[in-house]
Image (tube, rainbow, N blue to C red):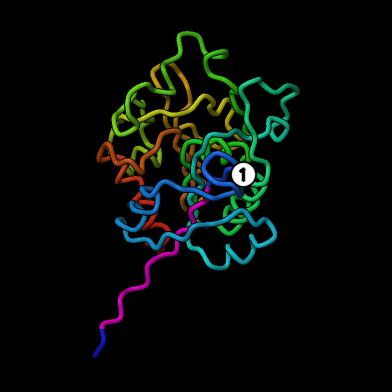
């Protein structure tokens, strides 16, 4: 008798995109392998999601959980009511339109959502919050949130709020994290809990306690630089499996 493996939860992982030129003559999608590797290692079935806003309902019917990834771009400040755009802001409008729609849809269905780096920033805006557009201009004595050392190493620590989902998952009051961002959550949306800060006060983690699993982290846990990183991915995949 053939062994039938237990069904893995299908985890949608959003892609990054780049215009024609540079790597290729035509527009292209890209994603670091470790996003999918760690989802698979934690028991999920990673499925890459291209930026097709009109197909969001079909994707939502397929997936059990959503990872919104990072990338070298920013959420349009218009989407959180900012009157001005900082000179450093770079947009990928179709990607943001798709990620906004699928994040809203996942939240409406109470599917587990994990926002990573830029994905945490988008999640905060979808949930009604705002962003700091450029940390060096907004935060006095800010840490190097675009760390100079390799992303496989920690750049600073995150102070975790006791009693939060992040604290329950990791069991840690402090987490070593890598850091690759120039923006961050400023004001959290209504009912959203800020569950982690950098020592300079920059928001590093947000969560929505009203939902089954809704967590955004400003660092990249897919690099697995601490036990807490693996715990985050394992908890997310377990929630997507209904456990």
- Please give left or right for residue 80 compared with residue 196 in the image: right
Looking at the image, the residue that sits furthest to the bottom is 1
**In the rendered structure, does residue 4 fall within the stretch colored magenta?**
yes
Query: How many discs mark residues in the rendered view?
Result: 1
In the rendered image, which quarter is residue 149 located in? Answer: top left
Residue 18 location, x and y as percent?
A: 58, 43
Where the C terminus falls, by quadrant? bottom left
**In the rendered structure, does residue 203 fall within the stretch colored magenta?**
no
Residue 33 location, x and y as percent?
A: 38, 50
Dot 1, crowdedness within 10 Å: few (<14), some or many (≥20)?
A: few
- Please give left or right for residue 81 compared with residue 228 in the image: right
Residue 236 versus residue 205 in the image, above or below: below
Q: Residue at x 31, y 56 (%)?
A: 42
**Circle 1 sits on which residue?**
20
- Please give left or right for residue 69 compared with residue 148 in the image: right
Asked whether the viewer can see residue 156, the reply is no
């Amino acid at each position: 008798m053939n062994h039938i493996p237990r069904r893995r939860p299908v985890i949608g992982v959003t892609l990054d995109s780049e215009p024609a030129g540079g790597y290729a003559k035509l527009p292209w999608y890209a994603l670091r392998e470790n996003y999918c590797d760690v989802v698979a290692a934690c028991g999920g079935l990673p499925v890459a999601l291209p930026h097709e806003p009109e197909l969001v309902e079909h994707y939502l019917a397929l997936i059990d959980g959503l990872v919104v990834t990072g990338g070298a771009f920013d959420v349009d400040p218009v989407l959180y009511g900012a009157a001005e755009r900082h000179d450093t802001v770079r947009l990928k409008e179709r990607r943001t339109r798709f990620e906004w729609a699928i994040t809203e849809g996942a939240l409406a269905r109470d599917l587990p959502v994990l926002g990573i780096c830029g994905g945490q920033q988008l999640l905060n805006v979808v949930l009604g919050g705002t962003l700091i557009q450029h940390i060096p201009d907004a935060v006095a004595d800010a840490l190097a949130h675009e760390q100079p050392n390799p992303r496989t190493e920690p750049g600073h620590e995150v102070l975790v709020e006791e009693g939060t989902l992040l604290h329950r998952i990791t069991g840690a009051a402090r987490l070593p994290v890598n850091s690759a961002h120039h923006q961050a959550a400023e004001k959290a949306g209504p009912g959203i809990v800020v569950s982690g800060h950098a020592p300079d006060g920059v928001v590093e983690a947000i969560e929505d306690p009203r939902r089954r699993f809704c967590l955004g982290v400003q660092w990249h846990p897919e690099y697995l630089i601490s036990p807490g990183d693996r715990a985050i991915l394992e908890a997310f995949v377990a929630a997507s499996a209904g456990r």
